[in-house]
Amino acid sequence: MTQHYFDYENLALRYEPFPIGLASPLIEPTLYSEMVANWPSTELFRQMPRLGNKFALSEKFNRKQYYSAIRSTPVWNDFYKWIKSRDFVYGVMDTLLEHHIDLGYAKHPTSYQSALKTIKSIFKGQTPHRGAKLSARFEFQMMPANGGHILPHTDTPAKIVTLVVSILDKDEWDPSYGGGTVINRPKDIRLIYNQLNRQSTFDDMEVIDTFPFEPNQAVIFVKTFNSWHSVRPMTGPAEKMRKTLIINIEVPK
């Protein structure tokens, strides 16, 4: 039986300046505690200074260590299989559709339906819909509380939806450290359109809203031409880490 890790029942979305919202509580408490307890060792991560001040462990960064950590840890091995499943990908699409966000990828197609749709499109001289091949991947991410940050950006064009899942114990994080996911808007209207995901600076951005960094939640948003977001520099102790799973649903390259 397939394990469904996320509960979107309490998802609350805002629609401007782009679709973004919060789902909390996200994961069954016992399972969530197991995920917190089995976070990968810090030495497995790679520092990523180009994007700000963060550390990553993923299919792209420290790939060998990533797969070793997943395969040796049952909770992450099961989670990885679920994230790679059609149930997860199209479950997110269907959830967004229920909230009036139709990205054209909902209704979990069968392989037969996908093939038939592709054949019909080709005969009509159309480009086959890419939705049948949506995929997902996730990254373990950490940022130090003393200055960790992510510069304002909108995500690459291949990304469709991103989920930022907080992984921390109930009393592990002081809100005074910061660490929330920030919705930004450029002060200069000429910078609003950013489909190709150029980075910007904090000084160039207004803060529209902030989702505080709290346990057992996911910030969920749709990549758009103006989906500017960031994590502003944090002000906590060096030994504290902002730990998240970054889950991307995307089209194949």
Image: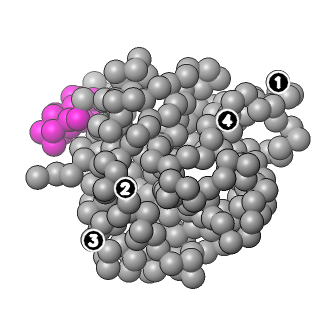
Residue 76 vertical position relative to residue 137 in the rendered view, above or below? below
User: Which structural element holds mark 4?
Assistant: strand
Q: Which residue is mark 4?
A: 210
In the picture, the disc for residue 32 is 2
**What residue is shown at x 45% (from left), y 69% (from top)?**
39
Q: Which residue is mark 1?
A: 189
Of 21 and 117, which appears nearest the observer?
Answer: 21
Q: CA distance from mark 2 to mark 4?
A: 23 Å
Q: CA distance from mark 4 to mark 3?
A: 34 Å
Residue type at tag 4? Thr
Q: Residues within 10 Å of mark 2 (few under 14, many from 20)?
A: some
| Pointer 4 or 1: first along the chain | 1
**What residue is shown at x 11% (from left), y 52% (from top)?**
1
Q: Which residue is mark 3?
A: 74
Q: State which mark lies toward you, 3 or 1.
A: 3
Our reading of the magenta stretch's main secondary structure is helix
Left or right: residue 81 compared with residue 22: left
